[in-house]
Each structure stands twice: as C-alpha cells, then as structure tokens.
Image (cartoon, rainbow, N blue to C red):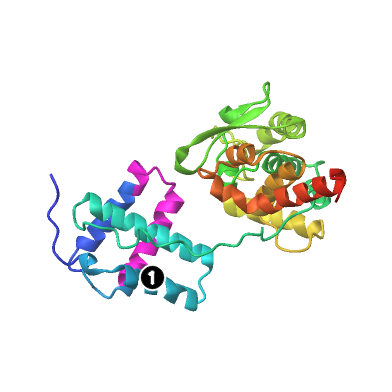
Amino acid sequence: MKQEYCENPLDGGTLQLWLKEFADYLKVEKRHSPNTVASYGRDTLRFLDAMKGRRVQDISQREVREYLLSLKSGGISARSSARALCSIKAFFRFLMTLDVIAENPAEILESPRLWKRLPTILSVDEVEILLNSPDIANYRGLRDKTMLEVLYATGLRVSELVQLQVANLNLESGFIRTFGKGKKERIIPLGDHARSWLESYLAHARPTFLKKGQPTRDLFLSNRGTAMSRQMFWQILRKYARLGNIKGPVSPHTVRHAFATHLLERGADLRSVQQMLGHADISTTQIYTHVLKKRMQDVFEKFHPRA
C-alpha cells in the first residue's frame, strides 16, 4: 500500500522521509555503492533547496535546465553537473514509483559534455619509474610496491583495490575477483609481475602488519593492522610520484587510465578493456577512442601504398 504524504514535500518531515527512502531505493533496488548513494542524496537535497519550497509536482523541465545552467555559471565542473543531473533524474524516477508524480521532468535532458581527452596520461616509462620507486628492502616498501603493481596490472578503482580480500586471489590461475559499482563481480587477469609480487607480499610483508589477536581477511593492511584506506593509499601514491619526479597530478585514477591506454596502444580491443575496467556501458570506455584513432592512422601510414 502506498504511504500518504503531505502535498508539499518541503513541509514537516516529508522531505527527510523521502530522502531516506530514496537512499534505500538506490542502495537496495539499484545496488549503488554507499559513496554513490551519499552523493546522490547531497545532489538531490541541493537541488530541492534551490527550488525554494516548490511542490515537486510543479517543477518543470525548464527549471531543471536552468538549475543545471546555474551550476555551470557557478564554476561547477561538467562532471559534477552531469552527476547532479543523474541524481535529479533518479530522484524523480523514485517519486514516480510512489505515484507522487506522473512524469519525470528531467528525463530527456542530456548530460553536459564531459572531457573527451584523458586528464593525465602516464607514459610506459613514467609508470616504470613509479612502480620502481618503493624501497622493497623493507616491509612497507614491499607492500606499496605490490599495491602499485596490482593497480597497474588490473586497472582497479582505488576503492576496489583497498577492499580486496585474500580470498579474492587465485594466484595459481593468475586472476583476481573484485566487486565494482553495484556489487557487480568481475574477473581480471593479473599477469606474472603482479602475481609474483603478491606471492612475496603474502609470504613476507603481510604477516608483519597483522596484529596478534586481530585476524583479518583484508589483503592490503595499514601499519595498524587494519585495512588500507583510500586516503592512505592516495598519500602513498603521491609520495612515490614525488620521489620519481613525475610531472603533473598522479592519482589512482591516473594509473587506471594508464592501464587502459597502454592496453589499447598494444592492440587490445575496446570491449575487452571495458570488461576489465568494469564499465557498465561501452560509451564510458569510449573516452579512449583517441588511442584507437592514432593506432589506425599509424597502420594506414605504414601499410597503405598511397599513404
């Protein structure tokens, strides 16, 4: 049975009730990650605040478009604006499931154009410098080296990397199992280098981080014996980027971009890279098509008789 709601969602506690149920809807039905659920909630609340108490039934497509334009004029990036639109669309779809509204005023609006070129592309030489920066003579360096090797070998998101458990490894067959956005499972090959470093880390470094009486299934551990956090790994990565004198910003996502770019440069097809990255839609992977275009141009110039 549908719940009864007051006519104006910004009156009383109805808005808070809707936002709570919206979060449950995203988490349970749409299987979004906690970070995505939190982001969508913040975006939606900011949008409703901007509507200044208007009934959701009265919000028009024009008002949604004007709100997005106001984000742009306020200096919000295209990526953040696109996420805001996704959040607004999702919220209105949720209200439709409650029969609060009959149509979604944001449904046909298109996302702002996102950048087509990668923000930073590390060369193979720069990646080698980064991977060789940790001092593997000590256990922290061995752990850091292993994390960097796994990140570059698999193209994992940083959240997926730090959430790996020992049970996710199959070193005999040479692959890992991870759960990406929406808890979607995927299998990724490791490669000989990453597998070798994982074996060394598990045998020599990880036992030194374990605290007596505090067993854990987490693969990569902090100095306190707890799971490595995203923030800690960011700091580790930046430290080695500085040590290697690598110019430009370096982040876990930069290494993920390098993984995809270097695969495509060496002949991998876009669909395989999509599967390894865990992109639900190949259109997301198509930001790398500039790599394919360059390779086609090189092939043409090398082999065509009239090039």
Say if residue 80 shows up in the picture.
yes
Q: Main SS of the magenta segment?
A: helix
The residue at which mark 1 appears reads as: 65
Q: Secondary structure at mark 1?
A: helix
Residue 208 falls in image quadrant: top right
Give the residue type at disc 1: Arg
Relative horizontal placement of residue 210, taking residue 93 as reference (left or right): right
Residue reaching furthest to the front = 306
Give percent across and percent down for residue 113.
53, 64
Give percent across and percent down for residue 271.
61, 39
Q: Looking at the figure, which quarter contains the N terminus? A: top left
Give percent across and percent down for residue 199.
72, 29
Q: Residue at x 60, y 62 (%)?
A: 115
Give percent across and percent down for residue 138.
78, 42
Residue 244 falls in image quadrant: bottom right
Relative horizontal placement of residue 21, taking residue 179 as reference (left or right): left
**Does residue 133 belong to the magenta stretch?**
no
Residue reaching furthest to the bottom = 73
| Observer-nearest of 298 and 15 | 298
Q: Residue at x 75, y 47 (%)?
A: 296
**Does residue 27 belong to the magenta stretch?**
yes
| Observer-nearest of 94 and 235 | 94
| Observer-nearest of 228 and 83 | 83
Q: Which residues are magenta?
A: 26-49
Relative horizontal placement of residue 134, taking residue 147 as reference (left or right): right
Say if residue 144 shows up in the picture.
no
Task: Report crowding for label 1: few under 14, some 14 to 19, many 20 or more residues within 10 A (C-alpha).
Answer: some
